[in-house]
Image: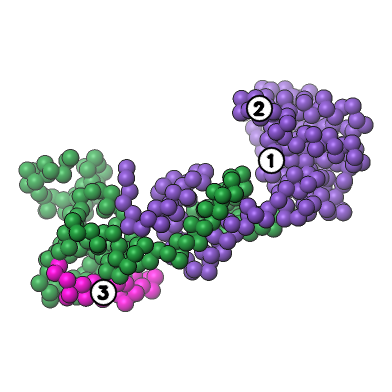
Chain colours: A purple, B green
Amino acid sequence: MKNNYSSRLLEEAIDEFSKLPGIGKKSALRLVLYLLKQDRKEVEQFGNTILRIKKEIIQCEKCHNISDTRLCPICSDPYRDQQLVCVVESIRDVISIENTQQYHGLYHVLGGIISPMDGIGPSDLTIHSLEERVRQEDIKEIILALSTTMEGDTTNFYIYKKLHQYPVKITTLARGVAIGDDLEYADEVTLGRSILNRTRFEDTFHTNQ
Amino acid sequence: MKNNYSSRLLEEAIDEFSKLPGIGKKSALRLVLYLLKQDRKEVEQFGNTILRIKKEIIQCEKCHNISDTRLCPICSDPYRDQQLVCVVESIRDVISIENTQQYHGLYHVLGGIISPMDGIGPSDLTIHSLEERVRQEDIKEIILALSTTMEGDTTNFYIYKKLHQYPVKITTLARGVAIGDDLEYADEVTLGRSILNRTRFEDTFHTNQ
C-alpha cells in the first residue's frame, strides 16, 4: 500500500525508523510524530547521540567489550579479579552477567559463535586475541559462558583445543534446572545433567541471597 | 535495578531511545546494539534525518498539516476539490483518510480536540484559522471528522457554533456498523444510529470497490 505523506522528509524519517529491528511502518510513524511534538533541543540531543555512538563507542582493546576508552571500565577496574576471564558471545551477555552482580572477574567478548551456516568461522571471532591474553596475562581460569546450542558447543570445543596446552583452568557455566522452574517442565537433557552434576546442599546456601 | 554498561555513551543512547513511546530499556538496548553493528554511513544518515525533521518539517500555513513547503502538497494540488475541507484532529488522521483514496478535498488539522481535563481549550487549536478560511476561501462544505468521544462531540459543536453563520454546508462522517463487523457485537448506540441513518441500498454499490 502506497502511503501519501504530505512531507517527503516525514517519509524518509519513517523509512529510517522502520529499518530498526521490530519497528514497522506504523510504529515508525508514531515515533516520528512523537519526535515532531518534542522540543527542538531534545530532538537534537537524540539525533546527536545517534551520530556519536558510531563515532565514539569503541572496542576495549583487551576484552573487545564496547567502551568509550581504550580499556573498558571493567578491564581497568583494579578491584576486579584479573586472573579470571569469562568468555561470552556478545556485549549483551556481558550486561546480563554484570546485572547478576555475582561475577567479579574480567570478560572476553568473542563477537559471535562459530556457525558455518552463517559463514562465521573461528577467524571472524576474537579467539586469537583470547589465546594471546592467556599467553601474556596471568590468567588462572577461563569460564566458557556460551549458549548451549550446537554452535555454542562447537565454539567451546574449539577454544578448549586452543587453550588446553596452557596452564589455565577451563570451566563452563553450571547447567541445570532454573531456579523457580517446575521439575515437571524441565527438559530431559537439562534434568539429566543436573542430576549428574548435583551439588552439595550446603554449597547452595550462598547463592540464595 | 542499576545497569552496568561499560560505555557511558551507550547508556546515554539507551536513555534517549527509551524516552520514545512504547520503547523500554531492553528494546532500547537492542536498538542501540543494532545501530552499533551497522555501517557508519547508515547510522549517520539516521541521525541526520532525526536532526532534520525538527528543522525542516513545517506546518502548512493553510491546513496546518505537516509539510516541507509553505503550502503542503495537498493544498497546492490543483486536481483536488478546493471547496471541500475535512476537519481532523491530527496529521495521523490525514494519513488514514488519504490511505482510503476516497477523499479528494482539502484538510484542516486542528492539532487536538477541546479537552478541559487536559487543559486544551479552543484557543489552543486552529479553529480561528478555520473560520478565517471559511471567510476568505470559497469553501462549500466542511466535513467534521473528529473522534466520537465526548471531547470530539464538544469540539464538533463548538466549530458548528462558529461556522453556521457562514453559507457553508457542515457535515460529519457517517457512523454505523463497520464493514466486516458482526451485528451481534456492534454496540447499541452505533447500531441504533445506523438504523436511523440507514442509506439507500443502491447508494452502497460504489463504496464496495
Q: What's the amino acid at mark 1?
A: Ser
Q: x, y percentage for residue A99?
A: 71, 49
* Callout 2: SS: loop
Nearest the viewer among B140 and B117 is B140
Q: Residues within 10 Å of mark 1 (few under 14, many from 20)?
A: some
Q: Residue at x 83, y 32 (%)?
A: A171
**Horizontal arrangement in the rendering, residue A34 relative to residue A123 (left or right):** left
Nearest the viewer among B84 and A97 is B84
Disc sitting over residue B129 in the figure: 3
Nearest the viewer among B99 and A121 is A121
What are the residue bounds of the magenta stretch? Answer: B115-139
Return the residue at label 1: A90
Disc sitting over residue A115 in the figure: 2
Q: Earlier in the sequence, mark 1 or mark 2?
A: 1
Nearest the viewer among A77 and A103 is A77
The answer to whether residue B126 is magenta is yes
Residue A206 image-quadrant placement: top right
Q: What's the amino acid at mark 2?
A: Ser
Q: x, y percentage for residue A106?
A: 81, 45
The chain letter for the residue carrying disc 1 is: A
Q: Is residue B104 visible in this depiction of the protein?
A: yes
Q: Is residue B116 visible in this depiction of the protein?
A: no
The answer to whether residue B201 is magenta is no
Real-space CA distance between mark 1 and mark 2, rounded to the nearest whole angstrom: 14 Å
Q: Residue at x 6, y 43 (%)?
A: B202
* Callout 3: SS: helix
**Horizontal arrangement in the rendering, residue B160 relative to residue A78 (left or right):** left
Q: Residue at x 70, y 33 (%)?
A: A124
Q: What's the amino acid at mark 3?
A: Ser
